[in-house]
Image (cartoon, rainbow, N blue to C red):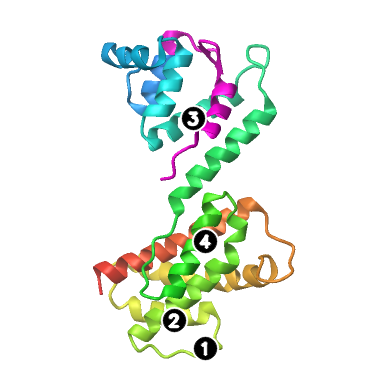
Amino acid sequence: MVRLTNSELKIFEKLLINGGYVLDFNNNDFGLFVFDVTGIDVYDKEYLQHVEEIMGGSSKGKILKYFLHNESEQLVLQLLKELLEYLEVLDDDIFEVNVKQLNSAKLILDKHTTADYLIESGSTEEKIDNLIEDINQSIIDGKPEFTLDRLHTLMNNYVKELCDKYNIEYDNQESLNQIFRRYANFTNQKLESDLSKTILVQTGSIFDKFNTVRNNQSYAHDNDILNRAESLLIYRNVVNIYEFIKTIENDIF
């Protein structure tokens, strides 16, 4: 998981902290909120001692800053996500929200959450590793719409590599969904669950639609590019398929 940078953390701090205060929380409510989200008691005597030693005080603002810079990335992201959701439902008369800062914070959070979907190579081919490196960089940059054409190429090359491995015949002119169905029919002989078999076979239909997106809504050609939200949805679902294939290749075959 990619850590938040200091400049990114400052955006959250400006949005959430005002002097020693955090939004509209009192000490008790703030402590309970953090504990419910992360399981950490920030008002534990030993924890507060660390905060005071590092931050020079133990106000809610300093506790939150200490937490953001010292706890694990997973816990930091969980807490920031919940704090942003809480901020959005606050009454404007109680706390005036800086919309620009809020939108910037959402983009940062989305970028780092998306980074959980970075791809690890399951191939022995250098060209596939190079594709994965490019795709991962676009995800780290928070631009899933830049990945779709390369993700399509990755899946096409990877499925062909697996077909070659098992001597599954295919025509190089066939589309991704056609070649994948050949691989799925072979693989289903090894799977235990009928539902898993159905999902794998129906993935061919997903790849059929993926072909259309790649050709008409990605940077593969001079297209009108698909919006970020739908690009991310497609990216995550295709990567889930890739990771499942990689797992069964390692664990079953």
Q: Give left or right: position of 45 versus 204.
A: left
Helix, strand or loop for disc 2: helix
Estimate the x, y position of residue 85 in percent, counting from the top left: 55, 29
Residues drawn in magenta: 1-29
Marks 1 & 2, CB-CB < 8 Å contact? yes
Dot 1 crowding, Cα within 10 Å, few <14, some 14–19, many 20+: few
Which amino acid type is marked by label 3? Leu
**Does residue 205 appear in this view?**
no
Marks 4 & 1, CB-CB < 8 Å contact? no
Between tags 3 and 4, which lies in front? 4
Marks 1 & 3, CB-CB < 8 Å contact? no
Which amino acid type is marked by label 2? Lys
Q: Which residue is mark 2?
A: 160
Q: CA distance from mark 4 to mark 1?
A: 24 Å
Dot 3 crowding, Cα within 10 Å, few <14, some 14–19, many 20+: many
Which amino acid type is marked by label 1? Asn
**Does residue 98 appear in this view?**
yes
Q: Which label's residue is closer to the chain start, 2 or 3?
A: 3
Estimate the x, y position of residue 187 in percent, counting from the top left: 34, 77
Nearest the eye: 114 or 213 = 114
Dot 2 crowding, Cα within 10 Å, few <14, some 14–19, many 20+: many
The residue positioned 45% from the left and 15% from the top of the image is 62
Determine which quarter of the picture holds residue 15: top right
Q: Which residue is mark 3?
A: 80
Q: Which residue is mark 1?
A: 172
Q: Which residue is mark 4?
A: 135
Determine which quarter of the picture holds residue 125: bottom left
Helix, strand or loop for disc 3: helix
Helix, strand or loop for disc 4: helix
Give the quadrant of the C terminus. bottom left
Q: CA distance from mark 3 to mark 4?
A: 26 Å
